[in-house]
Amino acid sequence: TTVLVFNVNDLDTRWESVLAVPGVEVIEAPTETSYPSYDGSGTIRVMVSVIRDPDGFILELNQLLTALH
């Protein structure tokens, strides 16, 4: 399965617009998760959401909550 991943700056304000699109299926509502940082010295906090669009494509909409260095 192919997943298209997009980073956005305003997931919280876009989410209602996403839900308003007819045929969108929410797989995962925005949820905060953490990943190891690139250098292993900390974590990167990300708000992650996953939807299936009306054409059947799976989209992951992410918002970084921790600045990348």
Image (cartoon, rainbow, N blue to C red):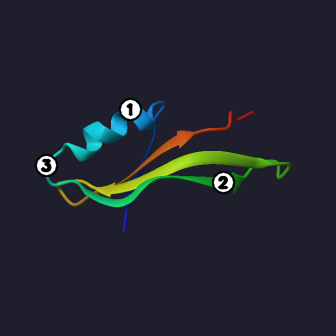
Judging from the image, what secondary structure is the residue with disc 2 in?
Answer: strand
Q: Name the residue: 58% across, 39% down.
A: 64
Spot occupied by residue 28 in the image (x, y as percentages of width and height): 40, 60
Spot occupied by residue 36 in the image (x, y as percentages of width and height): 74, 54
Given the image, on which type of amino acid does mark 1 rest? Thr
Q: Residues within 10 Å of mark 2 (few under 14, many from 20)?
A: some
Mark 1 and mark 3: span between their CA atoms? 18 Å
Mark 1 or mark 2: whose residue is earlier in sequence: 1
Q: Residues within 10 Å of mark 1 (few under 14, many from 20)?
A: few
Spot occupied by residue 8 in the image (x, y as percentages of width and height): 46, 35
Q: Name the residue: 50% across, 51% down.
A: 48
Q: Which mark is residue 45?
A: none
Mark 2 and mark 3: span between their CA atoms? 31 Å
Mark 2 or mark 3: whose residue is earlier in sequence: 3
Q: Judge from the rendering whether residue 66 lies leftward or rightward of residue 14; answer left or right.
A: right
Q: Are marks 2 and 3 in contact (CB under 8 Å)?
A: no
Q: Judge from the rendering whether residue 63 lies leftward or rightward of residue 41; answer left or right.
A: left
Q: Which mark is residue 22?
A: 3
Q: Name the residue: 68% across, 33% down.
A: 67
Residue position marked by numbered label 2 in the rendering: 34
Q: Are marks 1 and 2 in contact (CB under 8 Å)?
A: no
Q: Nearer the viewer, mark 1 or mark 2?
A: 1
